[in-house]
Amino acid sequence: MVKLTYIEHDGTTHDVEAAPGLTVMEAAVKNNVPGIDADCGGACACATCHVYVDEAFRAKTGEPSPMEESMLDFASERQENSRLSCQITVEEALDGLSVRLPEFQG
């Protein structure tokens, strides 16, 4: 299992364990993490699973695909480290990953 930490906009943290192969969004939904709406269910067709990836993990999570980039244009408060959590696959190399959630999704 891989440890993930979700940090709400108010600083509340949620530590979860996720199986490799899930996405960061799926792990949040399965563990009832508030702030990840996931309206499209992980199809990269909305921006309601927007997160800010901790700088220490940006290279490990990779770059957004062109499709993800276009969806991120709909994200509130986009930053350099913005990603859609449905597009980040949990793997052992991401053990300890921390993501912050924006105040609003979409």
Image (spheres, helix red, strand yellow):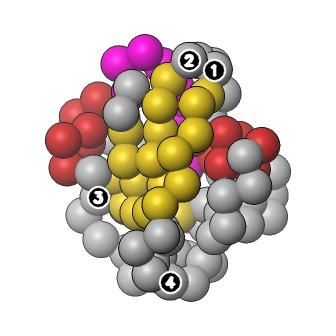
Which mark sits nearer the N-terminus, 1 or 2? Answer: 2
Is the C-beta separation of discs 1 and 4 under 8 Å? Answer: no
Q: Which secondary structure, mark 4?
A: loop
Q: Are marks 1 and 2 in contact (CB under 8 Å)?
A: yes
Distance of label 3 from label 4 (alpha carbons): 15 Å
> From where the camera sits, is residue 51 visible?
no
Depth order, front residue of 93/32: 32
The magenta stretch is 82-94
| Residue pictured at 25% horizontal, 64% vertical | 80
Q: Earlier in the sequence, mark 1 or mark 4?
A: 1
Residue position marked by numbered label 1 in the rendering: 19
Q: Amino acid at mark 2?
A: Met
Quick one: label 3, few (<14), some, or many (20+) residues within 10 Å?
some
Name the secondary structure under disc 3. loop
The residue beneath circle 3 is 81
In the picture, the disc for residue 1 is 2
> In the rendered structure, which amino acid carries the disc numbered 4?
Glu
Taking the spot 50% from the left edge, 83% from the top edge, the residue there is: 103
